[in-house]
Image (tube, rainbow, N blue to C red):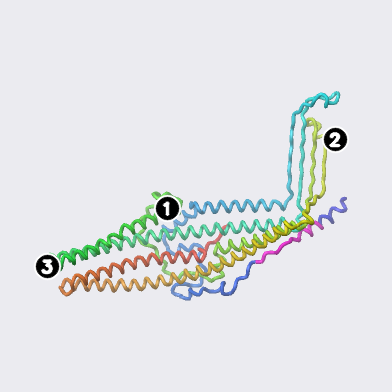
Amino acid sequence: MRILTLPLSILALALSACAVGPDYVAPTLTDSATGTFAASAEPALYDDRPAHDDWWRLYRDPILDRLIQDALGANTDVRVAVARLERARAMLRDAGADLYPGTGLDATANRQRQAAVQTLPGLDRENTLLDAGFGVAYEVDLFGRVRRSLESARGDFEAAQADRDAVRVAIVADTTRAYLNAASAARRLAVARRIVELLDRSLRVTGGRERAGLATPLDTARMAALREQRRSSIPAIAAERQAALFRLAVLTGRAPRDLPAAAATADTPPAIEVPIPVGDGKAMLARRPDVRAAERRLAAATARIGVATADLYPRISLGASIGSTGFGFGDLFGAGPLRWLAGPSISWSFPNQERIRARIAAARADSDGALATFDGSVLQALAETETALSNYARALDQRAALDAAREQADRAARIVRAQQREGRSDSLALLDAERTFADAQAQLADAEGRIANAQVDLFRALGGGWASPG
């Protein structure tokens, strides 16, 4: 028996190196998917350096840095994602346990009384029956069922890692967006109030001209209507700012009233003064958590084909057990009641394997679906990035045009005010100039907010530059 032990062990080890089902090979990406971005050919705005891991530090705002740190540590969505990751980690450990022998220990103790007719002469009718046993079993993974199961669990775990990173990217982006929106709304609020102050001054001038007989009550009413129209926008902007602050509090794991005062009083949105590093398509796809998650789920689905295919072949296990049964501890550990067994066991669904083949077909269909999902995630990532790059550039163009328009509207309004003081312009011309200047200021303030949102969209499309810590 000892002579056969080593050859049989070598044979089992050799057979265990065979795993049925397809070996996973990562999908190949085209050159157009991994090259430079079409919309990034503007060196004044972008450069080809890799995106920053902590991209929000490009704003150089310590308040925002602290808010991001709070969000990553206390946000409820992040906590849920971390819990799901820990569950996937536990399932990976569970799958890995099948690589090792399973052991079990059982013991029972029963106090019993037998009927008199069932008791042999000289023996007690009442006694304590003890039973104890220890067993070990090991599945010889001849066809790779266990290893493919482990591969599948590892793919699911790594997909859960990517999902957690995706939540972190989203939370960082949403926190930055809420902070920028609150600060932008504060600036727009200040602009709206300055416009009302300017219109108040124009209204006083028009009222004075009316009293002097140089303007009509209609001129005064028109200017007053414009002033009230602009003043009506203030409550809406203030409500928008409060909503952004409340959102910021929730994102950082706080009740709305507990938001830090520094964040609540920020009134100037930070700006990025340097070209934004965007890298290329290859780096972006490697960073994007949704693409990484889709690729890992494809790997897991491919491994599950092997798990299903392994059921076409026999499943062999090696087992052994030892135990004893006796009346009392003296009998339990004596040589007489001792029992043991050792040997292999085999199970095989044969010849009717139609159910197994149906499961294999289902696993292949799942793999095909996972591949289509991966391809779709790549295309979506590329489209989102190109769109974000283009939108950011066009938002900057729009701001430049609106800034020029505001300067011209301001110049025109000052000219009309001077002409009116000299009596060379009527109130209708002043009203039109003031309305144009107010519109230009408000539109420029709105454009600043759109630029901030376009920046966040761009960083999020680039994958946030998130480096998974495991």
Mark 1 belongs to which amino acid?
A: Ala
Secondary structure under tag 2 reads loop
Residue at 59 percent across and 73 percent down: it is 30
Residue 93 is situated, as x and y percent measured from the top left of the image, at: 65, 52
How far apart, in angstroms, are the residues tagged by discs 2 and 3?
A: 128 Å
The label shown at residue 372 is none
Q: Is residue 23 visible?
A: yes
Indicate which disc, 2 or 3, sits on the residue closer to the N terminus. 3
x, y percent for residue 363: 67, 60
Residue at point 32% right, 73% down? 405
Residue shown at the point (50%, 66%) measured from the top left: 461
Q: Nearer the viewer, residue 248 or 61?
A: 248
**Relative image position of residue 243 (x, y in whole percent):** 38, 55
- The residue carrying mark 2 is 336
Q: Please name the residue that numbered disc 1 is placed on.
A: 249
Give the residue type that dot 3 points to: Gly
For marks 1 and 2, the one nearer the N-term is 1
Q: Say which quarter of the image contains residue 148.
A: bottom right
Marks 1/3 in contact by CB < 8 Å: the verdict is no
Q: Are marks 2 and 3 in contact (CB under 8 Å)?
A: no
The amino acid type, in three-letter code, at marker 2 is Gly
Whether residues under marks 1 and 2 lie with C-beta atoms below 8 angstroms apart, the answer is no
SS for dot 1: helix
Q: Which residues make up the magenta segment? A: 11-25
Rendered residue at 83%/34% (across/down): 334
The stretch drawn in magenta includes residue 14: yes
Mark linked to residue 213:
3
